[in-house]
Image: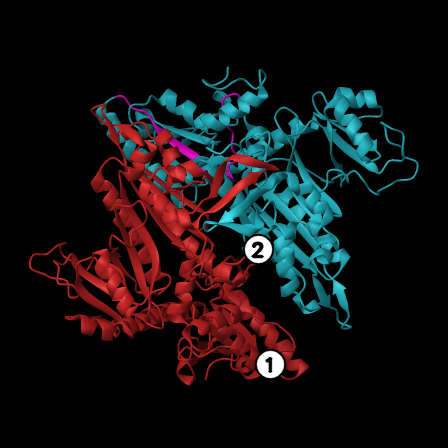
Chain colours: A red, B cyan
Amino acid sequence: MAAQGVTPRSEDYARWYTDVVKMADLAENAPVRGCMIIKPYGYELWENIKNALDSRFKATGHRNAYFPLLIPMGFIEKEAEHVEGFAPELAVVTHGGGKELEEPLVVRPTSETVIGHAFSDWIQSYRDLPLLINQWCNIVRWEKRPRLFLRTTEFLWQEGHTAHATKEEAIEETLRMLDVYADMAINECAIPVIKGLKSQQEKFAGAVDSYSIEGMMGNSWALQSGTSHFLGENFAKAFGIQYLDEENELQYAWTTSWGVSTRMVGGVIMAHGDDQGLRLPPRIAPIQVVITPIWKTAEDEELVFRNAKQVENLLREVGVRVHLDSREGLSPGFKFNDWEMRGVPVRLEIGPRDVESQSVMAARRDVPGKDGKQAIPVDGLATQIPALLDDIQQSMLDAATAFRDARLHEAATYDELKEQVADGWSLIWHCGTPECEDRIKEETKASSRCFPLELNEEWNPAGQKCVVCGKPAFGKAWFARAY
Amino acid sequence: MAAQGVTPRSEDYARWYTDVVKMADLAENAPVRGCMIIKPYGYELWENIKNALDSRFKATGHRNAYFPLLIPMGFIEKEAEHVEGFAPELAVVTHGGGKELEEPLVVRPTSETVIGHAFSDWIQSYRDLPLLINQWCNIVRWEKRPRLFLRTTEFLWQEGHTAHATKEEAIEETLRMLDVYADMAINECAIPVIKGLKSQQEKFAGAVDSYSIEGMMGNSWALQSGTSHFLGENFAKAFGIQYLDEENELQYAWTTSWGVSTRMVGGVIMAHGDDQGLRLPPRIAPIQVVITPIWKTAEDEELVFRNAKQVENLLREVGVRVHLDSREGLSPGFKFNDWEMRGVPVRLEIGPRDVESQSVMAARRDVPGKDGKQAIPVDGLATQIPALLDDIQQSMLDAATAFRDARLHEAATYDELKEQVADGWSLIWHCGTPECEDRIKEETKASSRCFPLELNEEWNPAGQKCVVCGKPAFGKAWFARAY
């Protein structure tokens, strides 16, 4: 039975998602259509994802900086594919300081252009390379069919921008950051994403090649959860990013860009949530452990709260993000449901009997009912709770991986693909042409997700033909319904 | 003698500021006039200020959230004083997604309106209060006379927004956050700010009362470095923020807002910088210790670098933000000047002789020449460097306080005020009326900074008259030239 106010997933997955975002207090629609308000609990989840990424960026030698929100319209037009891709989504500032502007300004839809402009000034010689920059900021892309976290007109993200002396180094960086994203998704968000190359039609507007991590959601649809782009010399040529090499010759730099956004929060909700609400991996959960005191008499209340407070302090000291639910006038049952909805990984119940036996009752969010419950002695909490959180993190990843693997199929014919994408992903030998992709999408609603790196030893392998159109295959590609 | 490329402060303070921002690689102008690019070193400085604030906000019970960048024009118009104050500074989006919008959208100049709208929904009963929210974001206010960090069309900041059941609680919160700001400025940025009440003319558009922290810069001018506003019921009435009290009666909430921006970075530059460049307080310095290896022969180079690397690891392990300058082809003298320009608090020199004697030569940025130098044995670094950084932090605060105190004067006549504001701040009994403020500003260029809380025991004290106009005094006010 689904929690009150939540549509069961099996009934209507889209409504389930909207219900959970609302009931778990993560976000809501803003007054301006397509924009969102990220509420504290949702923002704290994003902060944890953000911190997990930021430390990985710094460990790989990147430095944060900040570039302006407002970009001259002329900048966007300098890279031909770029403007074609982004023009329909732009928000345009035409008035500032009480006057009409001479040149309209664009609210950044991404920052390749303005950062390219800066890089052309910052980079003079090979000694200035590689230049490894990241920016945390907000982005605006007009969205016709908005959904909280997944597709919003304004969203938060990071965008990495790097410049390199050689093509090889730039490709290496593109793949390194794809690995960083996969590491974050797998080990922090417990989502076993698949790394792959996007098709030419699905790549970033202005890139030579785009790579993505693709996660499987609870309805078996795919979510592109992060992208890393090899931009070749495209933006270097559009913005004049040139350097003197060791032989004192002028060369164009090779650039990359890569981004992960608040969309990732939507991925966490859909990869793990159930009919009782959110289920959060401990490493990114704003609250890892919630303590719910249980009492009947005033005497018990004092006793139970004194103990609950001690347990709270004890756990906080060992670095656990713990919250004591001291709300009055709410039954334990109401509180249990409320914290289940919010996906807190561990609930500790403390009643008079637990105080007497110097133990607490721990309930796992990821294992329903009695199987997920165990009594833990108070003097063992400092070691057993962190271990329990680690175990939950691993179990959630294992469960998501098992769920995914059961829905990954390989198709030798187009008919097989059609069947497989009804409730899973289908891997086929594929030509990678837009025409063939469009046909598959129209006929099956499944889109090309990526050419997975692990399953493709070489591109354009001799003798392999596209399962759908019979043209020479570029490689093996995953097809799936997607957000 | 000033560093190369830097105008001496005594010659032209404004040019000195611009030179240092550029030479220390902190920021530069963006393609759009009035906007800025914050370069990595400047952004890391901001990140440290940000972290120092964020931990204080969380410790005082506030939670971060995120509200939209784009606000319907109609929202801004709901609070009469608010729209009057902000209308001339707005950037307006008139087109989105390829179409002209039905209602123009404003790029947020501050978020009282859109947050007020959300609060009216979030707050239903007294149980929902107090509501303590903070947001980290970017802001756009059209700026006619931009200066990097100090006044830019786009800037980064945090804005706190809280709602309370009573007037008293809201005022208490306003003053609590003013204290948090002062604590951050004094103990992190080593700027001995003065807390005070802004005059009615200088308050935030829409506030009942505004408070600020005011710091003294190196040319004795004042910089408003943070503000905290008691908004009364103004925004609650404009946006319908109401709650049912314990007697089940509908009441308006009392709200506050408070902000600190990237302007604070400008304050740090001007409060501490000298003709050699930046001087950064250790607690917010991106790099606290820089190691410059010195060698002549290849044999020495290897020896010196091995030792320098050991010292780097040793300091990193005890939590010091340390950087080893391993750039090739640059003389030690060049490197010394470069790190002086960037204001790194401690430079460690390691040459062959130091390796032999198992010591390093430490030079303080805040004490020039031989007085600031001392040899420290390698096996004492782990304790002595953190202690040295603490000492520098305190010395910088002491020096800034002594500098300030020597320039704080009290005036009994208007003539005295005129003399005092030429190179300092002047405290007078003041009426607080806009007419009198305007006259003083026109005649002396000094503006009303604040009515300092520490020096005013009561407002409208009996028998005291304004030193300038003779009307009854509201209190003692600081007047000074200001940014």
Q: Looking at the rendered structure, which numbered label has been put on residue B58? A: 2
Residue displayed at 47% across by 33% down: B30
The residue type indicated by label 2 comes to Lys
Q: Which mark is residue A331?
A: 1
Q: Main secondary structure of the magenta part?
A: loop
Indicate yes or no whether the magenta region holds residue A53.
no
Mark 2: give few (<14), some (14-19) or many (20+) Cα within 10 Å: some
Q: Position of residue A158 (x, y in %)?
A: 41, 49
Tag count: 2
Q: Nearer the viewer, residue B340 or A163?
A: A163
- Residue toward you, A393 or A374: A393
Q: Which residues are magenta?
A: B274-296
In this rendering, the answer to whether A277 lies above or below B95 is below
Q: Position of residue A25 (x, y in %)?
A: 53, 67
Question: Label 2 vs label 1: CA separation?
Answer: 28 Å
B450 with respect to A181 (left or right)? right
Kind of residue at badge 1: Ser
User: Image quadrant for the C terminus of chain A?
Assistant: bottom left
Same chain for mark 2 and mark 1? The answer is: no
Give me the chain letter of mark 1: A
Query: Tag 1's secondary structure?
Result: loop
Give me the chain letter of mark 2.
B
- Residue A89, position as x, y percentages in the image: 43, 50
